[in-house]
């Protein structure tokens, strides 16, 4: 029993017995938490039912939560839906929001995105910040057709009401230029607000942002500062990054294998499958590799594979495709792992599966499959996929050789910064000399039209 106010349960009991719904709900919460009274789920449920019978909306909402989570009662999505529906019918904005969750995930009802959005809108229009946040998540992550502009709008609204999760999501959108113009300075301002509250996710994003992940902001000192803060607050991604930094001796940090291993071990314990891959690599970095090290490394690789983490799957597939990290050269196994990653929509996995179809590694050569997969990634703006489509048109691999089409795709692939983009632009300019002025103008217009039709804002 948690001791708090010894008199609260007493006067709440008296008020609840007089039929005061608010007291009944508060007393039920004490019974559920065991605060000031012995934990008693049955008494809590009875009190909530009494309050709900008076059409007290918080009681209906709480009963829906209990059945949704299986707290003190058997998990029952149908009952949860009934309570939320009744509450929403009587004007509960929280009831609408919870119905939105149920329809979004198909819990107790068939999955219906349209009804989910309608209920979330009802709550958001009533000023519920969490519903605004959920709409942002729906438009940016859940709905089959993403609408980043709508997502940013709702994250902005929720942020204005102090929703920290929306603040972080909005900051990430400014980093990536999703639904808003790319603005690293504004992203930093937003994420810093959340990071100053000790939110590990925001600290991690700032650490990566200051690494130059957006292509424009590099401050090694601040990157290390925020990654260390995030790692201290338990973010496995930050712990993984610090392990990599210490392993390579980057960002002014001396190479320190022991420190790297400690970070990888903590990240692994925190659920990072990629950290397990790094630990396995450290076991196999010295030659000859002992049988014990091989066995331990293989166990770590298998744990990472079993996690089904797409990043780890790609890393291990890469090792199989090159016979590295104590693993044998096995293109078939590499293809299998890349495919598992691609099936989760992971861009690197999609491009690598396409590469293996194109080169006939681990699978019969199939230019058609390769092109289809490259196009899938290219639609999402992946420059490597756009480049490889251009290369296939340039060489006529599975398609009619077409210098103009190759120019279009290389133009799209070469829009970014860095050495890769510069190399692509050089190849694009070489192709330009093979085209007539009219063909070149048409190819440039096609590239521009494609880009405009695929803008994320």
Image (tube, rainbow, N blue to C red):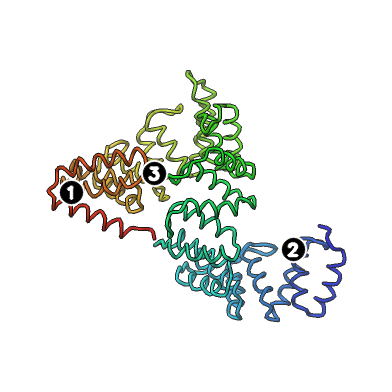
Image coords of residue 93 (percent x, y): 59, 74
Q: CA distance from mark 1 to mark 3?
A: 27 Å
Which label is found at residue 32? 2
What is the quadrant of residue 99 in the picture? bottom right
When the figure is inspected, residue 289 is found, relative to residue 334, above or below; the finding is: above
Q: Secondary structure at mark 1?
A: helix
Is 147 on the left or on the right of 47, as rendered?
left
Looking at the rendered image, the disc whose residue lies closer to the viewer, 3 or 2, is: 3
Residue 431 or residue 339, whichever sits in front: 431
Neighbours of disc 1 within 10 Å: few (<14), some (14-19), many (20+): many
Looking at the rendered image, the disc whose residue lies closer to the viewer, 1 or 2, is: 1
Which quadrant holds the N terminus? bottom right
Residue 298 or residue 253, whichever sits in front: 253
Q: Which residue is mark 3?
A: 348
Which of disc 2 and disc 3 is earlier in sequence? 2
Q: Is residue 303 visible?
A: no
Q: CA distance from mark 3 to mark 2?
A: 46 Å
Image coords of residue 443 (percent x, y): 20, 52
Which of disc 2 and disc 1 is earlier in sequence? 2
Residue 40 or residue 268, whichever sits in front: 268
Which label is found at residue 404? 1
Q: Residue at x 22, y 56 (%)?
A: 445
Q: Secondary structure at mark 2?
A: helix
Q: Residue at x 52, y 56 (%)?
A: 169
Is 217 on the left or on the right of 41, as rendered?
left
What is the quadrant of residue 69 in the picture? bottom right
Q: Across the whole image, how many numbered discs are drawn on residues?
A: 3
């Amino acid at each position: 029993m948690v001791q708090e106010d010894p008199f609260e349960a007493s006067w709440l009991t008296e008020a609840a017995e007089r039929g005061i719904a608010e007291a009944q709900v508060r007393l039920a919460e004490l019974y559920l938490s065991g605060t000031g009274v012995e934990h008693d789920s049955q008494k809590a449920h009875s009190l909530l039912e009494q309050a709900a019978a008076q059409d007290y909306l918080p009681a209906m909402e709480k009963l829906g939560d209990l059945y949704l989570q299986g707290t003190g009662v058997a998990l029952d999505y149908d009952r949860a839906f009934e309570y939320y529906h009744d509450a929403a019918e009587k004007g509960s904005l929280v009831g609408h929001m919870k119905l939105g969750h149920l329809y979004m995930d198909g819990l107790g009802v068939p999955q219906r995105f349209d009804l989910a959005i309608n209920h979330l809108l009802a709550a958001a229009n009533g000023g519920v910040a969490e519903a605004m946040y959920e709409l942002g998540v729906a438009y940016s992550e859940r709905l089959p057709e993403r609408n980043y502009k709508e997502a940013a709008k709702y994250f902005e609204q929720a942020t204005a009401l102090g929703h920290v999760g929306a603040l972080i999501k909005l900051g990430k959108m400014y980093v990536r230029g999703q639904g808003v113009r790319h603005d690293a300075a504004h992203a930093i301002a937003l994420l810093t607000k959340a990071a100053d509250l000790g939110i590990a996710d925001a600290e991690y994003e700032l650490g990566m942002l200051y690494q130059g992940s957006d292509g424009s902001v590099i401050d090694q000192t601040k990157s290390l500062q925020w990654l260390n803060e995030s790692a201290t607050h338990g973010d496995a991604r930050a712990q993984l990054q610090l392990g990599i930094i210490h392993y390579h001796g980057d960002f002014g940090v001396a190479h320190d294998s022991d420190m790297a291993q400690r970070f990888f071990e903590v990240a692994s314990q925190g659920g990072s499958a990629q950290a397990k891959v790094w630990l396995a690599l450290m076991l196999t970095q010295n030659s000859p590799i002992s049988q014990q090290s091989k066995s331990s490394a293989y166990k770590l690789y298998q744990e990472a594979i079993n996690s089904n983490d797409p990043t780890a799957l790609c890393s291990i597939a890469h090792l199989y495709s090159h016979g590295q990290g104590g693993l044998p050269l096995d293109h078939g196994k590499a293809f299998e792992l890349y495919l598992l990653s691609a099936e989760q929509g992971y861009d690197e996995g999609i491009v690598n599966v396409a590469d293996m179809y194109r080169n006939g590694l681990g699978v019969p050569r199939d230019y058609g499959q390769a092109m289809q997969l490259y196009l899938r990634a290219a639609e999402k703006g992946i420059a490597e996929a756009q480049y490889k489509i251009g290369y296939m048109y340039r060489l006529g691999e599975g398609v009619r050789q077409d210098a103009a089409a190759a120019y279009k795709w290389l133009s799209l692939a070469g829009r970014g910064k860095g050495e890769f983009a510069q190399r692509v632009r050089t190849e694009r300019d070489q192709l330009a000399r093979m085209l007539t002025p009219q063909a070149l103008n048409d190819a440039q217009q096609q590239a521009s039209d494609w880009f405009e039709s695929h803008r994320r804002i």
